[in-house]
Image (cartoon, grey):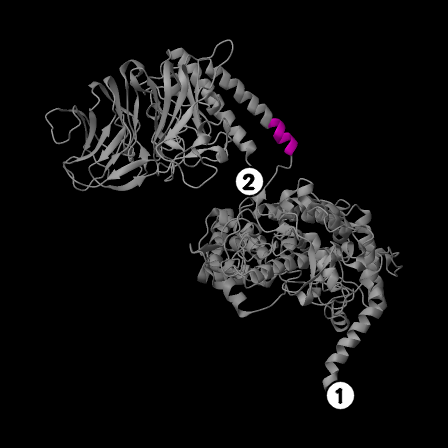
């Protein structure tokens, strides 16, 4: 026999289930919203808005009189703190107190609702609900970049009085309406970015993500705890487990992550971009009309750290011990330095090399492999104080470093400075620019030697050297071709009769084997066109140094098959090098060769950056093109004046400079218009069918469930294959449908909560049977109906509340009121309450005169993170000016609280917080009195007072009271304040005032 007591738990569950079945259909929150008539009251003169009739009617039934109207100073201070989270300016309070016109307080209400400070204050309440933070939480707690646009969107929505139905819809499906940032709501919660390799664990992590989304969506908008039905039917409300998985189906395509943030005026942006692109095209056409500088056939661009293979190379006689990457920017020596008509742009490419410290030694040899009279330019790494002051450049006639009697000195340079001798030591890795060291006769063996001086402590650096034919050069820079491209390069040359073509790669942009999409050889253009004689279909045959093994995408036969793209390309069998040759069907005159890594522009790796192209003539192999007359790979010098205009007369050069400047500005505008910042607002994919999970176990899937809302609220009537975005949109429409009994009730209750400190329903996110009954059910319904009929205007409801006699009551306690209604639920007075953490910090900064009211954008840091993969955050002790912004703009770190104000019940964004607790602890007192942040603010407060009124102690005390409390001190307070300032200084008085209840509590 089972003891009766042991049956009790089962009996309780059975009774609870029976109660749900019997009572849920009549539960108050699921009844249609009605519009009760405001009750008649005895004291009708007290009534200011219909709200007052509902409040006064209940008070009269309980035999309690309402409290007198608060003083104007108190009303002004209450208005600022409730609606803005900031004390009002003293001048504004004085103007209100002295305003003898009718409806003076109505004007204060309108001003409060119109201020941008309003949105910042009320957004904070909503961000608590959605557990907004800018880190992921869990064990790594990594930063979440791009989350802040959602915070700014919420602030803007409140300031603009966005209709609440649109506010809801945007947060669930804003990507469909141009509100990309709004869907940050869905992914604002914690996210475990460390995924398990075990499929079952990974599936459980995903199920937890969706449970979090379901929970915040159902509680925030509906006041329903749908997530309680994840593993079984809800124990108290009419929500089944099937309802849970049906709702999961509406959100199953939402994934954590970033996506591009579109402009609010996307059509306008597109129109502007088209205009700018047309201007760029016109400017480019004007620049192209300038006569081009001829490209010499025998130019050598020799790069430090160049591969030893190939005709143009270097020989390192010392070790490379470092590398200097030029910093970003357009200033002289930086990565994007454009140069001018007399000075070359930055040609350093990947930056400069640092060589081993060895005094009086040959360190590096440049081999240009050219013949005839050539101008030589040298360059090096500049900008650091410890670079060599006596680096020597020599021309070695025979290229043999063992013989030195054939050398001439080209230059001795101070490598701390620029090529023109300017010393501007910034201790940054800068490029020197090109130094012209004259015209010299070169043979094919001639080399340029970089040698160290006697110093044993300085660093010798090496960078690009250029050698160009005398006739095609100037002292500014040689004529150089554009850098090699990954898609298609056209190599033009004088027409030549050839029977074969050979392409030899000496280096690539990666460590892999070189890859060529297609190798083409074209005949000169005529009236009947031009022919590619390298095609296999034209009878040409290909051979190579070796082919990539066992890969059907990269065969030798693809080199001349006339088809483009990575799957039809050739790859060598040797890292960095290789050659491929095409023999024509018969000798033919050609004048250009075309080649590329991938003409479809999908791949850019394995690109041959150093190469030579030869053709077979009757006299043998002849080089017709190479990379050695090109700008170094990676250099963008398309608008460089010295390269485009250096050979022109002065007047044409100046006109060209003007066009280049205009095109550069236009390109910057285009880049800005094209740029789409990334916002952490979720990524959306079409989900797999949603299945009912037995007991919530991911390993126990049962039948398929179609996307839907809880059945007690109706049906979405969606199919299993409904597009992902349509699911979220349908969910949003069902939530904001005026027949939905919950949405309007829940939101007006939240609005009421933050005006009076407690909602009409004091479980604001649970309107189910485990929640509380409304204290004024008729008022709740009247407000909900008014809310919907006003077009879902939040400010309309707030205006009714703020103009009511109920909200304007004094907060002074009365014995009878405390005896009958100690919790002030019946609102016989205005319920006093302490400010929240953010409002305290903002108010302190406001009074000290340090508050920065800059709105929007990336937030400031309250914490100093470590640099590890697992992040720990230490509270900052000292703040720059941006740290004095309103606290709504602080970067919220999940699971962490501000070192000073976190003790004031600030949530840690770990879960939704519909209503903050209000505790009283010793730590709160200690923080406000002794925290370094507070002592510094007291000092700033004191300086502000002294600046305002000078050194007279009574005036200082009066001014401090006015700034802190918006009133003058009493005689007793004045005497005590003067005595405190005399004994301990003005900052001590300021600390006392900032710690007073009058400062910290709503009046």
State the residue position of label 2.
677
Residue 667 on the magenta span: no
Q: Nearer the N terminus, badge 2 or badge 1?
A: 1
Screen quadrant of the N terminus:
bottom right
Is 876 located above or below residue 436 in the figure?
A: below
Span highlighted in magenta in the image: 266-272
Q: Nearer the viewer, residue 607 or 39?
A: 607
Locate residue 575 relative to residue 952 in the image: left or right: left
Residue 543 appears in the picture as rendered: yes
Q: Is residue 423 left or right of residue 561?
A: left
Q: Which residue is mark 1?
A: 4
Return the x and y of residue 850 as percentages of the image width and height: 51, 48
SS for dot 2: loop
Residue 765 appears in the picture as rendered: no
Secondary structure of the residue carrying numbered label 1:
helix
Q: Position of residue 674 (x, y in %)?
A: 56, 33
Residue at image location 64% in from the left, 34% down from the top = 266
From this view, report whether residue 170 is shown above or below residue 663: below
**Residue occupying the point 45% across, 31% down:** 557
Residue 908 in which image quadrant: bottom right
Task: Tell me if residue 271 is in the magenta stretch.
Answer: yes
């Amino acid at each position: 026999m089972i003891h009766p007591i042991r049956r009790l738990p089962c009996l309780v569950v059975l009774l609870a289930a029976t109660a749900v079945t019997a009572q849920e259909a009549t539960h108050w929150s699921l009844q249609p919203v009605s519009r009760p008539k405001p009750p008649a009251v005895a004291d009708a003169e007290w009534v200011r808005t219909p709200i007052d009739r509902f409040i006064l009617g209940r008070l009269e039934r309980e035999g309690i009189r309402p409290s007198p109207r608060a003083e104007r100073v108190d009303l002004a201070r209450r208005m600022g703190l409730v609606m803005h989270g900031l004390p009002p300016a003293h001048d504004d309070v004085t103007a209100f107190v002295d305003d003898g016109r009718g409806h003076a307080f109505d004007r204060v209400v309108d001003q409060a609702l119109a201020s941008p400070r309003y949105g910042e204050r009320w957004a904070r309440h909503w961000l608590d609900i959605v557990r907004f933070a800018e880190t992921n939480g869990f064990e790594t707690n990594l930063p979440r970049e791009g989350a802040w646009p959602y915070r700014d969107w919420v602030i803007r929505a409140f300031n603009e009085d966005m209709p609440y139905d649109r506010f809801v819809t945007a947060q669930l499906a804003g990507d469909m309406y141009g509100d990309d940032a709004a869907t940050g709501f869905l992914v604002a919660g914690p996210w475990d970015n460390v995924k398990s390799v075990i499929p079952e664990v990974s599936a459980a992590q995903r199920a937890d993500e969706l449970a979090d989304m379901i929970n915040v969506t159902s509680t925030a908008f509906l006041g329903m705890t749908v997530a309680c039905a994840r593993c079984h039917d809800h124990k108290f409300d009419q929500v089944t487990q099937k309802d849970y998985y049906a709702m999961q189906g509406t959100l199953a395509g939402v994934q954590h992550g970033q996506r591009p943030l579109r402009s609010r005026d996307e059509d306008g942006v597109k129109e502007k971009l088209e205009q700018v692109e047309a201007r760029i095209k016109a400017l480019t056409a004007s620049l192209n009309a300038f006569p081009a500088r001829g490209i010499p056939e025998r130019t050598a661009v020799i790069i430090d750290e160049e591969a030893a293979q190939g005709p143009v190379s270097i020989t390192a006689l010392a070790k490379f011990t470092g590398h200097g990457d030029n910093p970003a920017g357009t200033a002289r020596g930086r990565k994007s330095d454009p140069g001018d008509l007399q000075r070359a742009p930055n040609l350093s490419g990947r930056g400069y090399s640092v060589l081993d410290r060895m005094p009086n030694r040959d360190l590096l040899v440049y081999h240009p492999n050219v013949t005839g009279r050539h101008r030589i330019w040298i360059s090096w790494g500049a900008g650091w104080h410890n670079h060599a002051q006596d680096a020597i450049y020599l021309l070695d006639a025979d290229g043999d470093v063992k013989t030195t009697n054939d050398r001439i000195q080209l230059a001795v340079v101070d490598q701390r400075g620029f090529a023109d001798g300017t010393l501007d030591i910034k201790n940054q890795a800068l490029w020197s620019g090109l130094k012209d060291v004259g015209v010299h006769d070169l043979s094919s063996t001639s080399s340029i030697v970089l040698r160290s001086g006697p110093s044993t402590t300085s660093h010798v650096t090496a960078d690009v050297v250029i050698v160009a034919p005398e006739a095609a050069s100037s002292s500014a820079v040689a004529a150089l071709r554009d850098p090699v491209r990954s898609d298609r390069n056209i190599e033009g040359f004088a027409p030549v009769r050839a029977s074969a073509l050979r392409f030899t790669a000496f280096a690539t942009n990666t460590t892999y084997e070189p890859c060529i999409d297609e190798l083409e050889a074209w005949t000169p253009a005529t009236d009947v066109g031009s022919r590619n004689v390298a095609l296999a279909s034209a009878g040409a045959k290909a051979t190579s140094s070796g082919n990539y093994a066992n890969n059907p995408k990269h065969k030798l036969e693809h080199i001349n098959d006339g088809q483009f793209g990575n799957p039809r390309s050739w790859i060598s069998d040797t890292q960095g090098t290789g050659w491929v040759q095409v023999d024509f069907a018969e000798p033919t005159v050609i004048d250009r060769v075309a080649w590329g890594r991938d003409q479809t522009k999908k791949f850019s790796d394995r690109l041959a950056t150093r190469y030579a192209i030869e053709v077979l003539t009757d006299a043998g192999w002849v080089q017709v093109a190479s990379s050695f007359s090109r700008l170094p790979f990676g250099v963008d010098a398309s608008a460089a004046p010295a390269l485009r205009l250096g050979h022109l007369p002065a007047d044409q050069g100046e006109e060209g400079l003007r066009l280049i400047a205009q095109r550069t500005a236009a390109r910057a505008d285009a880049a800005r218009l094209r740029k789409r910042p990334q916002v952490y607002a979720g990524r959306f994919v079409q989900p797999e069918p949603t299945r009912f999970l037995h007991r919530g176990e991911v390993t126990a899937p049962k039948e398929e469930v179609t996307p839907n809302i809880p059945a007690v609220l109706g049906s979405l009537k969606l199919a299993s294959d409904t597009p992902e975005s349509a699911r979220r949109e349908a969910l949003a429409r069902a939530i904001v449908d005026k027949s939905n009994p919950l949405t309007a009730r829940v939101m007006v209750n939240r609005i009421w909560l933050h005006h009076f400190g407690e909602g009409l329903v004091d479980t604001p996110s649970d309107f189910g049977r485990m929640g509380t009954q409304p204290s004024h059910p008729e008022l709740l319904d009247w407000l909900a109906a008014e809310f919907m009929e006003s077009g879902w205007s939040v400010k309309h409801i707030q205006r009714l509340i703020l103009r009511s006699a109920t909200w304007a009551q004094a907060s002074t306690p009365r014995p009878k009121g405390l005896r009958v209604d100690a919790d002030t639920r019946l609102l016989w007075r205005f319920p006093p309450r302490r400010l929240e953490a953010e409002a305290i910090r903002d108010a302190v900064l406001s009074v000290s005169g340090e508050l920065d009211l800059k709105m929007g954008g990336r937030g400031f840091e309250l914490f100093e993170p470590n640099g590890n993969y697992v992040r720990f955050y230490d509270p900052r002790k000292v703040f720059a000016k941006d740290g004095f912004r309103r606290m709504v703009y602080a970067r919220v770190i999940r699971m962490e609280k501000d070192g000073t104000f976190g003790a004031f019940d600030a949530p840690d964004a770990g879960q939704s917080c519909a209503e903050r607790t209000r505790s009283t602890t010793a730590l709160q007192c200690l923080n406000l009195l002794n925290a370094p942040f507070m002592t510094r603010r007291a000092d700033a407060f004191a300086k502000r007072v002294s600046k305002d009124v000078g050194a007279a102690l009574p005036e200082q005390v009066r001014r401090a009271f006015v700034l802190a409390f918006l009133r003058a001190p009493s005689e007793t307070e004045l005497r005590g304040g003067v005595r405190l300032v005399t004994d301990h200084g003005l900052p001590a008085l300021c600390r006392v005032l900032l710690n007073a209840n009058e400062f910290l509590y709503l009046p």
